[in-house]
Image (cartoon, helix red, strand yellow):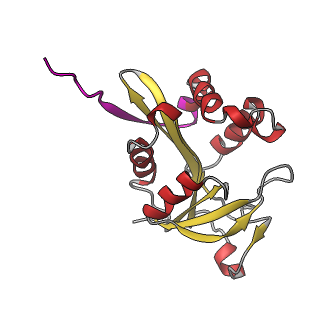
Amino acid sequence: MSSAVPKFEVRHHDAEGMYAQKAELLAVYEQVYADMLTDPFFTPERFWERLELYARWPGFSLVTGWLNGTLIGYSLGYTLPDGSKWWQGYKGDASPEQLTEDGKRSFAVTQLMVLPQWQRRGYAHQLHDALLDGRTEERATLLVKPDNIPAKSAYLSWGWQRFGQLQPFADAPVYESLMYEVK
């Protein structure tokens, strides 16, 4: 008798698909961010407000990961629009040209999360690759908390490069900004 390895299934969604899965997406978020939910920036309500904003932008994409019919993680992002304010609050050595968006240049990865019991098994990497596969932008960018060593180490091992620091909202933490050349 052999024990079957659960099959990891990746599904692609647009904004409508995000709204249809609100409860499941928030349930994963609440488990992954359980120790930060008392911080006003990290409440589920504030998180969902950000997702609704992201879903309005061109190029929005959501990739979900499922094991035996259960959502265990997801990743999402959107194309930075022409004149994007994404880089407002940037601290680093990049030139103004590197911080200028034209609506085609950069894809912002705004979330990548996997339930704690399924972390460090390669699922986040699969979600990452599925989200970026086929993108037409020349680069991708994301923000990671400087003290999130496991996530930062994973991103750097996947080819991301450090690109300064960024505080995206007045009440947000200062994040480390990373950049990735989309292939």
Q: Residue furthest top?
A: 1
In this rendering, position of residue 3 left or right of residue 7: left
In this rendering, position of residue 31 left or right of residue 125: right
Q: Quadrant of residue 69?
A: top left
Identify which residue, 132 or 104, lies in the foreground.
132
Q: Is residue 3 above or below residue 47?
A: above
Percent from the top left, x then y, of residue 154? 48, 56
Percent from the top left, x then y, of residue 178? 59, 65
Q: Residue at x 72, y 30 (%)?
A: 44
Quadrant (top left/top right/bottom left/bottom right) for the N terminus: top left
In this rendering, position of residue 118 left or right of residue 170: left
Q: Which residues are magenta?
A: 1-17
Q: Is residue 61 visible?
A: no
Residue 9, magenta (yes or no): yes
Q: Residue at x 61, y 21 (%)?
A: 23
Percent from the top left, x then y, of residue 127? 43, 44
Quadrant (top left/top right/bottom left/bottom right) for the C terminus: bottom left
Q: Residue at x 72, y 80 (%)?
A: 96
Percent from the top left, x then y, of residue 63? 47, 39
Q: Is residue 176 above or below residue 116?
A: below
Q: Is residue 154 above or below residue 178?
A: above
